[in-house]
Amino acid sequence: MMQMFLKKLLLLPAVMVSMAAAVFAAEELPTERAVDVFVPGKGNPYVSIRIPDVVKAGNSLVAIAEGRYKDTDQGQNDLIVSMSSDGGKKWSAPVVAAKSNGATFNNPCLVYDWKNKQLVLFFQRFPEGAKERDGDLVPGDAKGKCIRNFVCFSKNGKKWTEPRDVTATTKSAQAKLTCSGPNPGVMLSRGPHKGRIVIPFNEGSFNNWHIIAAYSDDGGKTWQLGKPSASGCGVNEVSMAETEEGGLIIVSRAWPPSESARRVAYSADGGESWGEVVPHTALPSPNCQNGLLRYSFAKADSKGGKSRLLFSSPSSRNRTNGIVKMSYDDGKTWPVEKALGPGSFAYSVLTRVKPGVVGILYESDGKIRFTTFSIKWLTSDKQSAPLRRK
């Protein structure tokens, strides 16, 4: 196919060749036509903006990230929001969803509650000066130097409720560290737990984490904590998606960073417990968080739809050259892969924009950017253009 395309280009006038090449490049390299969503110092007081998350809420896309006053993970971060009503072409100036006031807010994890038509935002609060590697962090819901879980809500993405401390019902008594996502949570759309909101976590102590989930069956008013996976199973930041039968899959960044394959686990009971956590060699783990999205269900389309699960990640250990993969069997195999484009590509999050179109919010060269690609492009037999390092 590629050879035939190039031969046809040679027969076209020079202007037409240039136009065709431009179209081909635009189709094959989504990141080369990305737009900026969050830029440090541009209309905001932050020296660094990191850890993106994005969901589709009604007709809008809602993006969130950590606005950092210091260029470090625990940098007195606020959580800031930007919105798009045109499918991600233009984005609003950022507004503060949760202001830390000297502490640090980490790991924003959004869910759109389609039943109550509201956004649910989970995150962690680090006390002022606390770091995740500190040896004197206290576990569970204890007083003192404790990492705590908070939740807040919004009907429109612009105004948010005051954060509510839910540590007592969403963090294990023995865990010193807890980390939601960073990736969207899930509101189950099928199965015996339909309507349940589930937030994925890795928790434990530094270098010794397990997978666990918190869930709510009443729209986020009350929360329960499920059972953890085995500890020390090589997990770190986690992403979650719904499976065909109303279960859940978690894909985790591998830990320690020297490990090359991401970890995968399944839940058949709505996040109340998890099966064995195993490495998946088809999913690269270049020391970076990944995106995960349930795009479509086979059983939701009476005309013969397909089960589609999407995954995004950098393809190199220096966090460059983004890729997207697709699975037709709930993440057991990943036969489809395309390059998203060359250059800087770190943390990423996937979202459905409209039928046939997927959006991706990702970190690149100190900014957070957004672009789209089509399912048709992803599944075409055209090969992505060769990656060019910037």
Image (tube, helix red, strand yellow):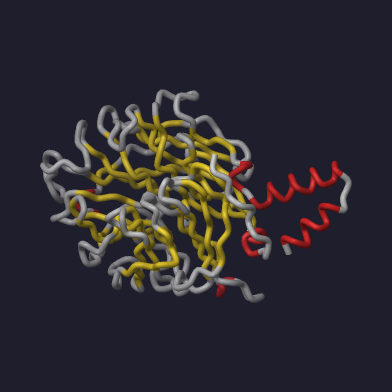
**Camera-side residue of 96 and 176:** 176
In this rendering, is residue 281 above or below 238? below
Which residue occupies 46% across, 48% down? Answer: 348
**Camera-side residue of 18 and 240:** 18
Image location (x, y in percent) of residue 32:
61, 42
Image location (x, y in percent) of residue 117:
49, 51
Which residue occupies 58% across, 58% down? Answer: 338
| Quadrant in the picture for the N terminus | bottom right
Which residue occupies 32% across, 69% down? Answer: 278
In this rendering, is residue 85 above or below 237? above
Q: For residue 247, which quarter of the picture?
A: bottom left
**Camera-side residue of 335 and 370:** 335
In this rendering, is residue 220 above or below 263? above
| Quadrant in the picture for the C terminus | top right
Q: Is residue 171 left or right of residue 332?
A: left
Q: Is residue 251 left or right of residue 158?
A: left
In this rendering, is residue 86 above or below 168? above
**Camera-side residue of 341 and 246:** 341
Q: How many labels does the image show?
A: 0
Image location (x, y in percent) of residue 168:
19, 51
Q: In this view, does 10 lie to the left or right of 245?
A: right
